[in-house]
Amino acid sequence: MNLQLYSNAQNSGGERVRIALALKALPYEYISIKDIGWEAYQAINPQQLLPTLSFNGQLVTQSTAILEFLEEAYPAPALLPGKPVERALARAIGQVIACEMHAIDVGRVRRFLGDHLSVSEKGLEDWSAHWMHEGFQTIEALLRRRTTTPTYCFGDTPGWADLFLVPQVRKGVTRFDLEVGRYPLVQAIYLHALEHPAFVAASPEMQADYTGALGRAWRPEDLKAP
């Protein structure tokens, strides 16, 4: 088994995969795009999006596809809950984040809005704030439907939904001044995850290529009251 992860410290898709690798205790080589350059990376991933996982030389792109592969290839410990309905709910939260929050607010989208559609910096800030709120408001409502309130989204150990949720909250807090206190269930999960070894190991500031250029390490005072 030879796993290599191509990513960079700030990429939240890469952080999702790093959390999964840590939770499953899978050793891997971390390859920073800052070290190899984007031209070299294009030969690895023609779309040039992060991350890419190499498994014995076979390349898998898109973070959700990578996570599905890891769950199938290395089923223990499981990231998805045991009950089919809870598995679907965990996947749903993951899709709210990956498809409806992250995908429309990544750098290439913001650059297109600014460079080609002449959206102002204030307009870009409003764009991010709007979709952040829409997404976290939705997730908070979905979490309220649970019949119990476990430590993490669907249990007292972290799993699928959490490894999507935490990087997105971190991105909001450190880059976009997110008032995460507006979403108390989300905030509680985030605070627990900040102390978990897998989430600590996968965090941007623990990666060798972290510079703080696109954000900074989380601080307790970042959790603002609503």
Image (cartoon, rainbow, N blue to C red):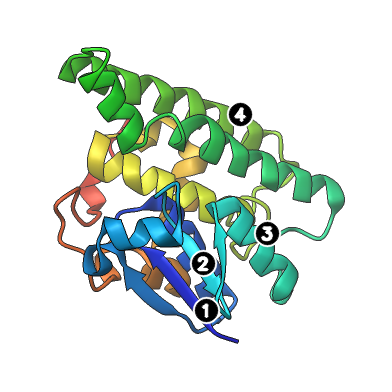
Q: Nearer the viewer, residue 133 or 69?
A: 69
- Residue identified by numbered label 4: 141
Q: Do the CB atoms of the residues marked 2 and 1 lie less than 8 Å apart? A: yes
Q: Which label's residue is closer to the chain start, 3 or 2?
A: 2
Q: Nearer the viewer, mark 4 or mark 3?
A: 3
Spot occupied by residue 158 in the image (x, y as percentages of width and height): 59, 62
Residue at the location (48% across, 22% down)?
Answer: 134
Position of residue 99 measured from the top left corner of the image (x, y, whole percent): 55, 35
Q: Residues within 10 Å of mark 1 (few under 14, many from 20)?
A: some
| Residue 42 visible in the picture | yes
Quadrant (top left/top right/bottom left/bottom right) for the N terminus: bottom right
Q: Secondary structure at mark 2?
A: strand
Q: CA distance from mark 1 to mark 4?
A: 37 Å
Please identify the quarter of the rendering in which residue 122 is found.
top left
Position in image of residue 89 (x %, y %): 73, 42
Nearer-the-camera pick, 213 or 89: 213
Q: CA distance from mark 3 to mark 2?
A: 12 Å
Regarding mark 3 in the picture, which secondary structure is present there?
helix
> Relative to residue 191, is residue 214 drawn left or right?
left
Q: In this figure, which residue is indicated by the disc labeled 3?
A: 68
For disc 1, the marked residue is 3
Q: Secondary structure at mark 4?
A: helix
Amino acid type shown at disc 4: Ala
Q: Quadrant of residue 71?
A: bottom right
- Quadrant of the snapshot with the C terminus: top left
Residue drawn at x 47%, y 81% is: 28
Distance of label 2 from label 1 (alpha carbons): 7 Å
Q: Nearer the N terminus, badge 4 or badge 2?
A: 2
User: Mark 1–mark 4 contact, CB under 8 Å?
Assistant: no
Q: Which residue is mark 2?
A: 53
Q: Disc 4 or 3, which lies upstream in sequence?
A: 3
